[in-house]
Amino acid sequence: MFKRLKITCDEATTICDKNQYGEATLLDKIKLNIHFIRCKICFKYTKQNMTLTKIYKGHAISCKELKHCLSAEDKEALKKSLENNKA
C-alpha cells in the first residue's frame, strides 16, 4: 500500500505546480507531504514556488491599477520616428 504513495522528485514538483493552481487531488497532496518527509529539497522548492506565486500575484494586482498608455505627444513622436526609420 505504501509503495503507491511513494513518488519521485519529478512527480513531486509536478504535483507542487498542480497544487498551486488548485488542480491537485487529495491523494496527490498526501503523496507530496509523504515525499517531503524524505526530501527536503522538494520541500524547499515548494516553499520557494509558493513565495514566487504570492509575489507575482501582488505585482499583477498593482499592475492592473496602472494605465500603460502613451500620451498623444508620445504617439506622434513614435510615429515620426518609425516613418524616419522606413526611409
Image (cartoon, rainbow, N blue to C red):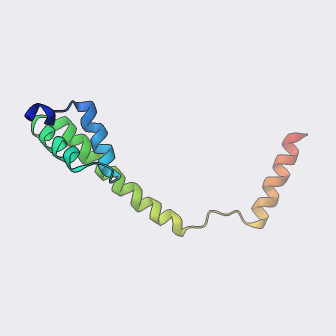
Q: Position of residue 55 (x, y in %)?
A: 36, 56
- Toward the viewer: 19 or 43? 19
Question: What quarter of the picture does the C terminus occupy?
Answer: top right
Q: Residue at x 78, y 64 (%)?
A: 73
Q: Position of residue 68 (x, y in %)?
A: 62, 62
The image shows residue 47, relative to residue 40, as above or below, that is below
- Toward the viewer: 25 or 62? 25
**Numbered circles on residues, count:** 0
The quadrant where residue 12 appears: top left
Q: Is residue 77 left or right of residue 67?
A: right
- Toward the viewer: 15 or 46? 15
Q: Is residue 4 left or right of residue 80?
A: left
Q: Position of residue 10 (x, y in %)?
A: 27, 31
- Toward the viewer: 23 or 59? 23
The quadrant where residue 1 appears: top left
Q: Residue at x 40, y 59 (%)?
A: 57
Q: Residue at x 29, y 51 (%)?
A: 50
Q: Residue at x 30, y 52 (%)?
A: 51
